[in-house]
Amino acid sequence: MLEYTRVRGIPGLRSASGLNQRFIPGSGSFFKMGSTPRRRLIALLLLLAVGFLVLLARLFDVQIEQHSKYTKLAQGNILRIIPLPPLRGAIMDRNGVVLVGNSTNFVVSMIPDEVIDKRKTFSILGQDLAVPPSVLEEAFDRMRDVLPNYIPVPLMAHMSTAKVGRVSMDIYRLPGIVIQTIPQRTYIQGPMAAHLLGYVGSLTVGDMKKSYARHLPPGTGIGKTGVEKTFDDILQGEPGESRKLVDSQGSVIRKLSPRYPTQGHSIHLTLDFRLQKAAEDALGDRRGAVVALDPNNGEILALASHPSFDPNLISSALTAKTWNGLLNNPDHPLTDRAIQGLYPPGSVFKVVTTMAGLKAGVIDPAKPFKCNGIIFLGGWAFHDWKKGGHGTLHLRRAIMQSCDIYFYRAGMALGPDKIAEMARNFGLGLKTGIDLPSEMSGTVPDRDWKMKRMHQPWYPGETLPFAIGQGYLTVTPLQMARLMGVVATRGFLSTPHLFLSTEHSVRFQTESIVRKIPVEPTSFSPLREGLWAVVNEPHGTGHPVRMKEMEIAGKTGTAQVISNRIPAGGTAHVKIRPDSWFVGFAPFRNPKIVVSVLVENGGDGGDVAGPVARAVFKEFYQDYLSHPESQPDLAANKKEQRF
């Protein structure tokens, strides 16, 4: 307090009363000079109220108005949550042989919220990874608009252990950079069965905007083709997350309990790895396809296409050079010829013409026919494949030696519409319904088709090549296997499929679709007799397929092709050779397998495609019919009458 106090004997300080006065600091109150005690109390309370209101407003702003902002900042600075991609289930054949599994993939990622200097970070990472910083910037820019800032953005995947080591050494000066370990799809058999298995690819920006992938973190592999795509929802697991407490420098203070990702369901395919290997080995380096299936239920036993590719290269560190090499390859290795290749079936189609002729009554199996090697229609000459013709023959021998003139005559009597109708009954011109994406349907022409497609009428001269599997007609090797399955089962058309079971079920759960075509079972006997002779008679066109252990029936085909199949840089005289076909079934009296073989520009069907089919039949016999428990059935079959 401040006070004036009277002090005697000090010169210069004299009051009116005659006494000296002196100022002593601390001896009085400042408020006492200009206020009463009541006023001082009110001023103090007002000051406290204003301070409390300011503090309350600030608390409201921080805790209510900006709650989300500071929550994210707190989580980003203290709790680091990193999504973990799920594991995919394995893919196995019907006997449990693993075809596709998982391995480890190292990925370097950036958490945008934690990065202090992006340019410096990209520069250091570029040196460690031996790539231009612009490559990393492009990878970051592709994903930053679709991911929250606290989610790691993948910059480079499939890093070698050496690169992981270099980045780890610099991690202390790279805040926001993390090295993740995510699953990598591994195709154990390499190029074998690559088309049917397909491959996976990392999530793209387009994928992440779609509903089926919004819950999946970056780096997750999803099916792009084949079985991987068709059954992606079964194979795909659920993602997890890793949680860690970190300091302001990004150093881990404590690891919290993670939520582990779950693995998807493993699946068994109807495929038999041994038959698949036999088919691909027999096909070798030639362009073509092999299909083997059970005609009774549609189970696919082998589905080969060549040339093939290694899905490991596509699912891992695919370079632009590798991808462009696959796309621009004149032999089209990415095309699954078994379900996407469209070819004229050649003489194998005589199966359809035979059944149409038998049903319409224009073919009499017992009636003799004279083939002199040539037939004329409207001034045009149509020749048989055998110069001079086959002489006098019946249906059985016409099928056995594939007499073109016989079926030219039948086609002229039937007309295109009846042939087309029977072809569709056999499943041609329609997708088979196999559980693989991108199947082609092929073409079965008739009068209406030509008018709608070409705005022209059907000419009589077009019926003759149609009757022997040429002209506008195109099919896939899978369709031809299905067609022969109808003959094998005397009229039942099955839907081919690859899915057999998951690890939680014993067998294929969905009912196999098998329907009866409108042809009497007894009508197949003359046709089957001719198909048996094709393989088992010495002069049959398919005699190279014959096996003494098991009776095989089938049909060869040598289909003419056109020169526009010649790719740029291709060899013309090779590309215009006829395609080679063989399609057959076995055992003859109790069919359990159908094999369809197509060799592009292979030439003679019996000599080229036939041995490939025989290799598959032989493997099937050894694996399924040569065991002691199978011998009684085989012996009983041999005692039956052939026809």
Image (tube, rainbow, N blue to C red):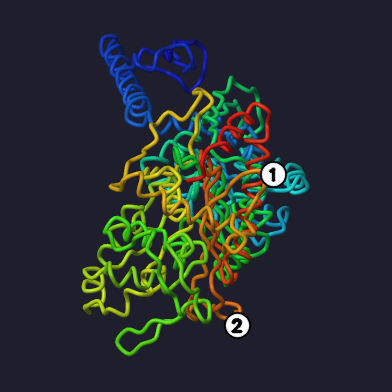
- State left or right for residue 30 relative to residue 419: right
Which residue: 53% across, 77% down?
Answer: 386
Hey, which quadrant is residue 2 in on the image?
A: top left
Which residue: 60% across, 56% down?
Answer: 136
Residue 197 or residue 553, whichever sits in front: 553
Which residue: 54% across, 48% down?
Answer: 292
Any part of residue 84 in sight = no
Q: Position of residue 241 (x, y in %)?
A: 54, 29
Residue under numbered circle 2 = 573
| Amino acid type, residue under disc 2 in the picture | His
Which numbered dot is residue 121? none
Residue 389 or residue 512, whichever sits in front: 389
Residue under numbered circle 1 = 173
Callout 1: 10 Å neighbours few (<14), some, many (20+)? few
Any part of residue 461 in sight = yes
Rounded to the nearest angstrom, the CA distance separating label 2 from label 1 is: 64 Å
Q: Is residue 422 above or below residue 33?
A: below
Hey, which quadrant is residue 252 in on the image?
A: top right
Sequence-wise first label, 2 or 1: 1
